[in-house]
Image (cartoon, helix red, strand yellow):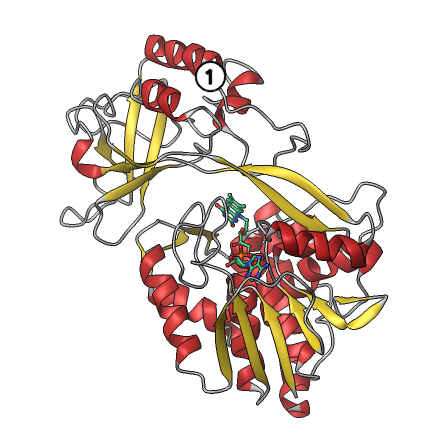
């Protein structure tokens, strides 16, 4: 069997590697660098277009459980991510260049995969997987519109700025992980987060300018809808002057080691590359214009002279109405030679897209069934095929997608989630045993 995959992003690359590992030949089409998207900046596969974080690694957080399941399943991209990690406390963050390069090497060294640099403008013949992502090219979107009818929807995401470490004023900023005091931290090792502390007056001045800052206008044909967890910082400020102080700028668990003072608010920066030369503003996705970003973000104490390696920006997100269009194997109901994978199905997030690519690869190879809904894989990947709603909107992995426990475990929220994680991993191991028996 031979299949064509459109898009060597997170889902397409994982699916190609899974298919090849099952002995299936793959033509993997990628339009970059010849044709770029509005957010990608390189021609390498599996580029991370925004944050370099794959979110929490802890099992009582749903993204942590999904990652653990992917490790147990033998996901190639999860392995690459673990190999390229940079310090990020309880989260998994990666050196983005190293990550994409590792995936590229994996694809190139697989004899059954042919990487073809070409924009796909019509649906290819034969078995096809569409993994063209939220920034699928316009020609492909047109071709998809023909086969899906009015199933395509559009909305916006926002990217956070990245700062050159050399330009940070360390007389104001300090290293510290939340809830870790100096005595908790090994004195020889540096904490993962860089903190810029605000006085009350500095905070309210900053919020005022953020709200007044000029924004990139929304184009007529695009509806403005932000995906949860990637809300532009100025939109959070619009919702109330204290919203940021209780959100991405919350000061809890942080005390300036030089003064012993807990500040009124804090902006945190996280390492963007292993060398530690680039740091991103955590939770600061934005749609302010470029000059306004420089003006307003230089009001952050410690960033008065910040040099921006990358400024924030806004992008379209394309996804299909999965529940209407897809069957239980993520194939088009009206033409089951075409399968969809990744964010274009209406899931959202890096790790979710890798998970979707993994399962699409396994299913297209003709092995296995959908994992049970009490696994993280089953919970998030059933969402695009089984959700019943009049207004289908993307979702990332969260414990709300899991079926409730038959017997409610004792203890609080954390204990409940740990029990759900335990149940998920047990269920996954049964699924994996059945899968290996089929192989
Ligand atoms: C601006 C932006 C910021 C985001 N930030 C985050 C974040 O911080 N954290 C997070 O977890 N998720 C984020 N996401 C969501 C999502 O997780 C990523 O977009 C993720 O990369 C999706 O994986 P994918 O494989 O579905 O698509 P992609 O990784 O985008 O891969 C699709 C590939 O298809 C190629 N392609 C498109 N059209 C064609 C064509 N016609 N022919 C050939 N190739 C084509 C593209 O060039 C691309 O390489 C963001 C999304 C966007 C748009």
Position of 389 with respect to 265 (left or right) is right
- Residue 292 location, quadrant: top left
**Would you name the residue on which mark 1 appears?**
214
Q: In the drawing, does residue 339 fall left or right of residue 256?
A: right
Quadrant of the rendered image containing residue 210 = top left
Q: Residue 252 versus residue 127: which sits nearer the camera?
A: 127
Residue at left offset 60%, top offset 50%: 134
Q: Position of residue 8 (x, y in %)?
A: 51, 65
Q: Nearer the viewer, residue 247 or 318?
A: 318
Give SS at disc 1.
loop
- Which residue appears at 23% of the width and 45% of the height? 185
| Above or below: residue 285 compared with residue 49 | above
Q: Position of residue 287 (x, y in %)?
A: 49, 28
Q: Residue shown at 64%/53% (left/top)?
A: 139
Q: Position of residue 241 (x, y in %)?
A: 50, 13
Confirm whether residue 22 shows in the render.
Answer: yes
Residue 410 seen by the camera:
no
Query: Seen in the image, is 48 located left or right of residue 165?
Result: right
């Amino acid at each position: 069997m031979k299949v064509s995959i459109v898009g060597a992003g997170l889902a397409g690359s994982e699916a190609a590697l899974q298919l090849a590992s099952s002995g299936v030949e793959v033509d993997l089409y990628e339009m970059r660098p010849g044709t770029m998207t509005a957010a990608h900046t390189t021609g390498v596969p599996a580029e991370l277009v925004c944050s370099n974080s794959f979110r929490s690694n802890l099992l009582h957080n749903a993204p942590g459980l999904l990652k653990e399941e992917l490790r147990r399943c033998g996901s190639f991209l999860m392995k690459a991510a673990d190999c390229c990690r940079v310090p990020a406390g309880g989260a998994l963050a990666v050196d983005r260049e190293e990550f994409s390069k590792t995936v590229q090497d994996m694809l190139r060294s697989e004899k059954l995969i042919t990487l073809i640099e070409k924009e796909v403008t019509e649906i290819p013949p034969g078995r096809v997987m569409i993994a063209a992502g939220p920034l699928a090219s316009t020609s492909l979107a047109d071709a998809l519109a023909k086969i899906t009818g009015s199933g395509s929807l559009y909305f916006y995401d926002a990217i956070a700025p990245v700062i050159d470490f050399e330009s940070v004023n360390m007389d104001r900023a300090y290293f510290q992980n939340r809830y870790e005091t100096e005595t908790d931290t090994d004195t020889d090792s540096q904490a993962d987060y860089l903190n810029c502390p605000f006085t009350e007056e500095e905070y309210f001045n900053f919020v005022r300018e953020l709200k007044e800052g000029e924004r990139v206008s929304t184009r007529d044909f695009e509806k403005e809808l932000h995906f949860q967890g990637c809300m532009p910082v100025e939109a959070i400020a619009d919702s109330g002057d204290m919203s940021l102080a209780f959100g991405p700028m919350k000061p809890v668990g942080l005390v300036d080691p030089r003064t012993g003072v807990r500040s009124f608010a804090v902006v945190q920066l996280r390492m963007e590359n292993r060398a530690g030369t680039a740091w991103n503003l955590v939770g600061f996705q934005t749609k302010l214009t470029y000059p306004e970003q420089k003006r307003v973000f230089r009001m952050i104490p410690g960033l008065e002279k910040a040099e921006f390696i990358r400024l924030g920006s806004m992008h379209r997100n394309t996804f299909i109405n999965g529940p209407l269009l897809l069957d239980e194997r993520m194939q088009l109901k009206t033409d089951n030679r075409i399968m969809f994978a990744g964010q274009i199905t209406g899931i959202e997030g890096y790790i979710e897209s890798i998970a979707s690519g993994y399962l699409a690869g396994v299913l297209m190879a003709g092995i296995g069934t959908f994992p049970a809904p009490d696994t993280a894989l089953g919970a998030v990947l059933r969402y695009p095929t089984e959700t019943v709603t009049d207004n289908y909107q993307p979702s990332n992995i969260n414990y709300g997608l899991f079926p409730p426990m038959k017997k409610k475990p004792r203890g609080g929220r954390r204990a409940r989630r740990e029990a759900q994680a335990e149940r998920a991993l047990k269920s996954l191991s049964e699924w994996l045993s059945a899968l290996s028996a089929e192989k």
